[in-house]
Image (cartoon, grey):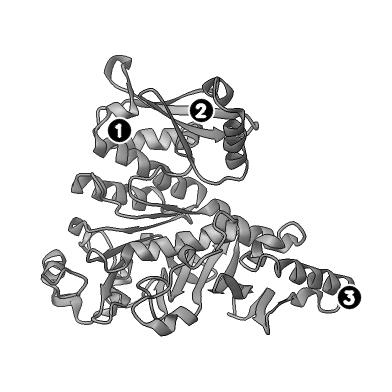
Amino acid sequence: MILYYNIQNYKSFRDKVEFNMIASSEGQDTNKTDHIVNVFGVPTLRLSAIYGNNGAGKSTLLESIQKLRMIVVGVLKVKSKDDLKHFKLDPIYADRPTVFEIEYIAKSKRYCYHLSILNCVIVEEWICIVNDDNSVEYLFTREFKDGKIIISMPKYDNDLKERMRIELYSEELQKRPYTPFLRFGLSQYEELKDPFDWFANTLQVVRPNAHCLDEVKFFTDSHMHDLAVEMISFLKLDIEDIQVKTVPLGDLMIGSNPETFEKIKNELDNNEGTVIMRRGDTEYTLYKDDNGEYLAGRIVTIHKNGIEFELDEESMGTRMIFELIPGFVGSIINNKVYLFDEIECNKHPEVTKELILMFLIAGTKSHGQLIFTTHECNLLDLDILRTDEIWFTDKGEDGATSLYSLADFKDLEDVRDFQGAYLHGVFGAVPKI
């Protein structure tokens, strides 16, 4: 679970802004306790919605988290300034680092990870365990001083052999200063495995019209499949079942360039995201199953009398629901953290609302989270969400994005129509036309 996230000097985020999932104990948020999970004595929200005008930075917030994840797992190597864009509207920020900081729960421990990058060089990196009394234990610290990378691991301060090994790692990272030590040191230090795996396997960011990670593979799991079918049935889409049809990847690649085949297998081995391939009018998702086999799968929906439909024969709205379902169910069953950009895209407002309500009801014992951006005013209802679950992004005249919660506003007891108040600019974050 995410507890808080800070970003600074990334695109429209100039100064440090903080997004947090810590539940408020005041005002109208004293109810809806089923929206909260207590972790280490910290009341943590399971869901948050982010509103804002077009171009105000709400998608950029999720994009920045996606960038952090990609850097940590090694999908993105920051080798040019275009890989990590700074705030451009003030020239002094070209010489200031882009800073990420995130506190999260992984395998029953509370971690805080900090990453600071300037001119394609990691100038500061550290990760610590936060104890129940809020004291911290650093697993490692890294700094860039006088052109040299310096790594320290307090656990090994009294171990000469390990200190020498860490110095060798520091020298090796001089050749690739964009590589996080959280990943680089993974093979040698067991204590880095759990905090790294959270980025690799728990944190998922889904952009609009993008395939949800492991979408096809997801529906092959019986527990996931059964809950997904139940949710789909509740939405009255006339779909009675969901099936995955698979063929060996080698069969699909017959006649293809062998180098292309090897490249795809390498991508699947390194978990570099979903690989999509079309054969004629049929779209396949390529994946590696638990037995190590490379497969190509496609989803079919089963309608009345067992009639099969290819997924691309369904409406755009139905296909977009299928993009969301793995995240909703994966969050409930596997305690994953899913971030969806424009969750309402191509869906009826009532469908979006019912999906949110199903998540809140079905996952009361779950430590998974859903965080999403939206323009859907139908959700601006305190019968559905708490005030601390509603966030806004807004831009000032200087072009910098600010981020704040509805819980920051006082005297909300007199507000009867939150949708109308939002559309009339009471909370900011709306177009100024």
Residue type, numbered disc 3 = Leu
Q: Quadrant of residue 266?
A: top right
> Is 122 situated left or right of 237 in this image?
right
Residue type, numbered disc 2 = Ala
> Is 355 situated left or right of 161 in this image?
left
Q: Residues within 10 Å of mark 1 (few under 14, many from 20)?
A: some
Which of 235 and 204 lies nearest the eye of the viewer?
204
Which of 211 and 377 lies nearest the eye of the viewer?
211
Q: Is label 3 or label 1 in front? A: 3
Q: Quadrant of residue 132?
A: bottom right
- Give the spatial CA distance, label 2 vs label 1: 26 Å
> Is 367 situated left or right of 50 in this image?
right
Q: Is residue 109 above or below residue 270?
A: below
- Give the spatial CA distance, label 2 vs label 3: 50 Å
Question: Residue 36: in sight, yes or no?
Answer: no
- Give the spatial CA distance, label 3 vs label 1: 62 Å
SS category of the residue bearing label 1: helix
Question: Which disc is residue 160 wearing?
Answer: 3
Q: Position of residue 395 (x, y in %)?
A: 26, 75
SS category of the residue bearing label 3: helix
Residue drawn at (51%, 47%), measured in percent from left and top? 334
Q: Residue furthest right?
A: 161
Residue that mark 1 sits on = 233
Residue that mark 2 sits on = 296
Residue drawn at (63%, 65%), measured in percent from left and top? 180
